[in-house]
Amino acid sequence: MRDVLAALTSVWRSGGTAGVATVVRTRGSAPRPVGAAMVVAPDGTVAGSVSGGCVDAAVYELAAEVARTGRPRLHSYGVDTDELFGTVLTCGGEIDIFAEPISRTTCPHLPVMIAAVAADRPVATATVVANSDCARPGRRLIITPDTVHGSLGSARADAAVTERARELLAADHAELIGCAPLEAGTDVFVNTFASRPRLLIFGAIDFAAALAQQGALLGYRVTVCDARPRFATADRFPAADEVVVDWPDRYLTAQAQRNTLDGRTVVCVLTHDPKFDVPLLRVALRLPALGYVGAMGSRRTHDDRLRRLRVAGVTDTELCRLASPLGLDLGARTPQETAVSIVAEIIMRTHGGAGHPLTELGGRIHHDHTP
């Protein structure tokens, strides 16, 4: 959904009605994850995708229809869906799509969500997608860690869904949930927009510039940090959200003290200089919250780094958290190729992949996300 917010915002602010189709449930090998969305504007332009192409044309028509009629619809697409007209999911999975009209009338609190996402503050939406009461589908809550806007039509339901939505928001996980306080058979889709995960790159070198580009592409909030002011300049790292001049270990310690790090935070050490690397890694490997800690270097550099870290008091258990040399074996040579190998390993570790060519494997291609 995050990738279509600009298009949705434009329609909302113009006073028009957009048709918004969202993946609320998947079964089997679905091409796009829960939360993927398509927006159809009043002039027919489209943003986003819900299936990577398989049924997007049919979903486009569905979204345009609900914008025109003002009536939300829940529709399933799968292997048995009207293959004659090309609306079958060729991957063999099944997806449930909730299509709804979004306008100033149907979603007056949309600016709350837009402002939170723009400011990188966590926010969730909870929308009734199925209910025997035809007046309820489309009702929604917009939930932040300390505020609630809108209503599902019941104070008890609002309270129950808000509590669950905040749990899902903390886990950065979207989910279709039942809502007994409304009535049996009521389904509410909770979509979450957590603050962006952080990618902390230490070492203002050419590899860092390429890695910053890849990190930004993947949706990370990218920081480049180096103690050398001549190298750590914003002009050299246009893809980074911030460039910091500071000693790496001091900066990372300060970020930990401010509680700005979590289990999604990635630390990549590219400096190749023991006076920076060793103090920094000693701090990083002792922070339980970090999701990934990697360091660049040759095998010889790696062995020397391990020796120095042990002398500095880092235990073997702590060293087991270090990915070094970082990245997957792709045969990378250039900074750009190396950056791809690094983010490939990060994706693999995040989603539980194996790093093998898909042609050598059987079974499902997509891994289930475990928050």
Image (spheres, rainbow, N blue to C red):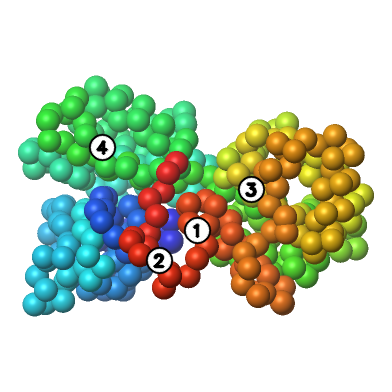
The reply to whether discs 1 and 2 touch (Cβ–Cβ < 8 Å) is yes
Q: Marks 2 and 4: which is nearer the front?
A: 2
Query: In the structure shown, which secondary structural element does the residue marked by tag 2 occupy?
Result: loop
Q: Nearer the viewer, residue 95 or 192?
A: 95
Q: CA distance from mark 1 to mark 2?
A: 10 Å
- Identified at 92% across, 49% down, the residue is 275
Q: Amino acid at mark 3?
A: Tyr
Q: Which residue is mark 4?
A: 177
Q: Which mark is residue 292?
A: 3
Q: Amino acid at mark 1?
A: Ala
Q: Residues within 10 Å of mark 1 (few under 14, many from 20)?
A: few
Residue 100's x, y, as percent? 22, 54
Callout 2 environment at 10 Å: few (<14), some (14 to 19), or many (20+)?
A: few
Please state which of the two labelled residues, at mark 3 or mark 1, is closer to the viewer.
1
Residue at the disc numbered 2: 361
Q: Determine the secondary structure under disc 4.
A: strand
In the image, which disc is placed on residue 354?
Answer: 1
Q: Which mark is residue 243?
A: none
Residue 149 drawn at (x, y percent): 35, 34
